[in-house]
Structures are given as structure tokens and as C-alpha cells.
Image (cartoon, rainbow, N blue to C red):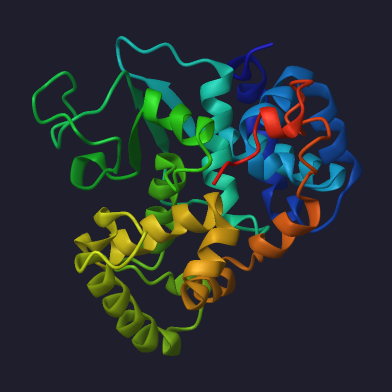
């Protein structure tokens, strides 16, 4: 069953349900989820999305419900030569839910649809051009309320969980940043304004480290404070234990921003290398998804 077939008749239902959706695990939500959610969608998330894989059974159900709600209120479509399938929509939804997991009532009011392109693009959203180097962008002006992603890069972000890069999460972090009306690298909607001055001072210090080559944070983070916030957030969600070890103060800032202590969670659930890989491949963890230093 395709998302498009089950989402439309449920859109009004979820809009009416939204105010109460996350307040309790009421029967209507569970009933709706059990009717529309397909087992292969859970299997796909289990295989591709490490954040989902590390959740408890109860939290996986909540994650799936939040994906359904997101897709009921946000269109995911492709350009003329891109076919959008359920797995694409699941990865977009996962990109949206992961950074706001600590905020159960969060709603992305500043996004209406996500457009997938067949490859990287330029600032005019043209792909196949010499300057087509952009993998994701949140639209402004006439493109306000839209996000554009390279479909291959969206998938690559979840295929490789060791490179500290995930364009889907990166762009949704920009939306979180922009929720207060400014894309300035300080998520005022999720923290207190009085913390902005020390945060910006700290960011400038970390950007200086990047510019001097004294950091393992991606060079693109030195573009400005907004990009530093998005790039360091990718790092936080992909390699939390490494970030905590190499940049403990940054880790603490982001952990407080997102209300998630991922390094501690990952340590608690880390599989042993000779046990079956949690992705479900049947291989030993050490021969499958275990990161190798």
C-alpha cells in the first residue's frame, strides 16, 4: 500500500487530532496506525535509520506515528524526472522527526512540501550544470515553505552514518533555527534567549578552530553561525559519542538544545561485535554496521 493512498483520507483526521495526538497514547491513534502502517516500512526504518533502530519498541511506535503525522501535513514530491516512492518519504519524515524527537508536540509550521531532485543542483535549482553542487536548500521568497533535496544525497545521509553528514537533518535543523523568524544559528524556539550571547561567542571560537584546521568539524561549518549550527547538529546526531569526546562543550550545548543525550543512549544500547547486527541483516555486527576506527 502506498502512502499516497492512505494519507489523503486521514489528513483531516490528523489535523483535528493534532492538539491531542502527543498528550496520551489514546486508542484512536493506535487504531489508525495499525490500519495504515505497513510492516515493510518498519523494516526499512530498522535497516536504514540508526536513530530508529536504537529506540525502544514503544518509542518506535511513537516515531512511526509522528512520521505519519508529518507526511499527512507535508507533501513530498519529485521533479519531473524523479519518481518518489515510500522509502523516500520515510527518509524525509525521519529527517524531520530526529532533531525534534525531544519535543513531542513540535510541528513544522514553516514547511509545506519537500521537492526531490535527481542530483545536486545550483541556486536556481538546476541540476546537471557545472555549478550544481548543492545537496539541500530551504527555499526563500517565492520558494518559501519549500525544501529542495537531492534524492541521492538524502539516501546517502542514512547509508553512511559515520561521515557526520546527513543533508535531510541539516535542512530540517535550519527550519528549527528559522522558527523564531531568523536563520541565525540560535534556536530560540527551543531554548532561552539569555543563552544566545555565550552561544554565539562559543560558536565564533569553534569557527576559528575550523578555519585554522584545528577541528574535525566539516569546513562548511565556518560559513556562518547558521551553518555551524546545522553542520554540528549533523555531527551530533550521527556521531554523538565522538562529538562528546572531541568537543564536550559543544556536545553539551546541543544536548541541551535538543533535549537528547544521544551519547549516553548509544552507550547503553551498543551491540557487541560478535552478536547479530541490529539492522536485521543476519550478519555479525562487526562484519556489518559496526563503525571501524
Residue 37 in percent (x, y) is at 76, 24
84 to the left or right of 217? right
Quick check: can you spot residue 183?
no
Residue 260 is drawn in which quadrant?
bottom right
Residue 19 is drawn in which quadrant?
bottom right
Residue at (71%, 64%) from the top-left corner? Answer: 264
264 to the left or right of 82? right
Residue 251 in percent (x, y) is at 52, 70
19 to the left or right of 210? right
Residue at (57%, 65%) from the top-left corner? Answer: 258
Residue 186 in percent (x, y) is at 38, 72
Residue 245 in percent (x, y) is at 55, 68
* Residue sitting farthest toward the right: 27
Residue 127 is drawn in which quadrant?
top left
Closest to the observer, 139 or 117? 117
Up the image or down, 36 lies above or below 239; here it is above
Amino acid at each position: 500500500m502506498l502512502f499516497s493512498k492512505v494519507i489523503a483520507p486521514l489528513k483531516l483526521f490528523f489535523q483535528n487530532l493534532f492538539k491531542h495526538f502527543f498528550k496520551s497514547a489514546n486508542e484512536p491513534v493506535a487504531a489508525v496506525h495499525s490500519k495504515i502502517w505497513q510492516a515493510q516500512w518498519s523494516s526499512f526504518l530498522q535497516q536504514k535509520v540508526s536513530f530508529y533502530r536504537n529506540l525502544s519498541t514503544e518509542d518506535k511506535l511513537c516515531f512511526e506515528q509522528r512520521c505519519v503525522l508529518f507526511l499527512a501535513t507535508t507533501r513530498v514530491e519529485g521533479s519531473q524526472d524523479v519518481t518518489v516512492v515510500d522509502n523516500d518519504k520515510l527518509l524525509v519524515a525521519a529527517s524531520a522527526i530526529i532533531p525534534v524527537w525531544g519535543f513531542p508536540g513540535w510541528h513544522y509550521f514553516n514547511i509545506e512540501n519537500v521537492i526531490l531532485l535527481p542530483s545536486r543542483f545550483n541556486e536556481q535549482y538546476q541540476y546537471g550544470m557545472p555549478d550544481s553542487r548543492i545537496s539541500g536548500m530551504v527555499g526563500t521568497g517565492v520558494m518559501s515553505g519549500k525544501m529542495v533535496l537531492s534524492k541521492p544525497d538524502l539516501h546517502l545521509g542514512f547509508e553512511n552514518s559515520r561521515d557526520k553528514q546527513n543533508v535531510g537533518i541539516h535542512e530540517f535543523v535550519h527550519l528549527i533555527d528559522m522558527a523564531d523568524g531568523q536563520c541565525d544559528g540560535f534556536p530560540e524556539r527551543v531554548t532561552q534567549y539569555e543563552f544566545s550571547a555565550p552561544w554565539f561567542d562559543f560558536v565564533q571560537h569553534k569557527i576559528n578552530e575550523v578555519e585554522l584546521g584545528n577541528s574535525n568539524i566539516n569546513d562548511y561549518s565556518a560559513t556562518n553561525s547558521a551553518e555551524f549550527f546545522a553542520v554540528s547538529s549533523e555531527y551530533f546526531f550521527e556521531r554523538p559519542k565522538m562529538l562528546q569526546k572531541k568537543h564536550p562543550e559543544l556536545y553539551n550545548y546541543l544536548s541541551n538544545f535538543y533535549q537528547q543525550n544521544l551519547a549516553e543512549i548509544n552507550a547503553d544500547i551498543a551491540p557487541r561485535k560478535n552478536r547479530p547486527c541490529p539492522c536485521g541483516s543476519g550478519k555479525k555486527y562487526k562484519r556489518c554496521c559496526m563503525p571501524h576506527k
